[in-house]
Image (cartoon, grey):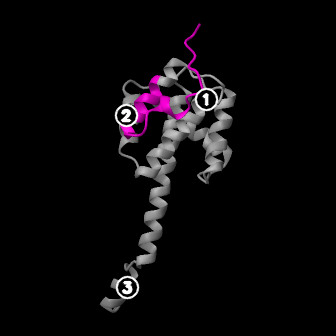
Amino acid sequence: MSNPTDRDCQFMVTPAELMAAHIVDRKQKTLDAVLTAMTLVASADGWIDAAERQEMLAFLKRNDLLRVSERDLHDDVQQRLRDLREPGHVLAAAYRLGRSGGYAARRLAVAAAWDVAVADSRVDPREMRVLDLIRVTMQARPARAAAPNCQADDGT
C-alpha cells in the first residue's frame, strides 16, 4: 500500500509550474485575440488579399507569436473563416475579443487588425467598420486615429 503523502506529492504543483502555465495561457489568449482580429478585418471585404495574408504572418513573427508552422496558421485562419460565415459568429467573435487577455493583448490585437487593414495600401469601408467594432469591443483607441496618413477607400 502506498504512503498517503506520496499520493499527495504526485499532484503537487510548484509555484514555478503555476507561473509557467499562466504565461502559456496568456500567450495563447493573446494569439487567439490577434488571429481573430486579423481574420475579422482581412475578411471584411469578402476576401483575403495576398498582402493581407503576408502581413498576418509578418505581424505574428514580429511580435514573437508564431508558435506553429505557416501551414497550421493557414489552417487556423481557414477554420476561423468558416466559423465567421455562420450567422451571428462575427458578433460572437467580437464579443470573445472583448473578453480576451489583458490590456497588452487587446492593444496588440487592435494593432494587428490595423496592420492587416492597411496591408494592401487601402482601407475598405467594411474593414473600417470592423476595425471600429474591434476597437469598441476591446475598449482600445479609435482605429481612425492610429494612422492619419492612410485614406479610406470609399469605393469610387
Nearer to us: label 1 or label 3: 1
**Quarter that holds the C terminus:** top right
Compare marks 2 and 1 and give the one earlier in the sequence.
Answer: 1
Compare marks 1 and 3 and give the one earlier in the sequence.
Answer: 3
Compare marks 2 and 3 and give the one earlier in the sequence.
Answer: 3
How many C-alpha atoms fall within 10 Å of the one at disc 1: few (<14), some, or many (≥20)?
Answer: many
* Residue 27 on the magenta span: no
How many C-alpha atoms fall within 10 Å of the one at disc 3: few (<14), some, or many (≥20)?
Answer: few
Give the Cα separation between the discs numbered 1 and 3.
54 Å
Give the Cα separation between the discs numbered 2 and 3.
47 Å
Q: Amino acid at mark 3?
A: Cys
Residue range of the region highlighted in magenta in the rendering: 129-156
Q: Amino acid at mark 1?
A: Val
Q: Where in the figure is residue 77, as x and y percent of width and height? A: 56, 37
**Residue under pointer 3:** 9
Disc 1 and disc 3 in contact, CB within 8 angstroms: no
Q: Nearer the viewer, residue 129 or 86?
A: 129
The local secondary structure at tag 1 comes to loop
**Residue under pointer 2:** 136
Query: Which residue is at 37% across, 39% downward?
Result: 139
The local secondary structure at tag 2 comes to helix
Q: Give the answer, above or below, for where 144 lies relative to 138.
A: above
Q: Where in the figure is residue 20, as x and y percent of width and height? A: 48, 69
Nearer to us: label 2 or label 3: 2
Instruction: Check residue 118 in the rendering and tell me which mark sits there, or answer none.
Output: 1
Q: Residue furthest left?
A: 4
Q: Amino acid at mark 2?
A: Val
Query: Which residue is at 43% across, 38% downward?
Result: 141
47 to the left or right of 133: right
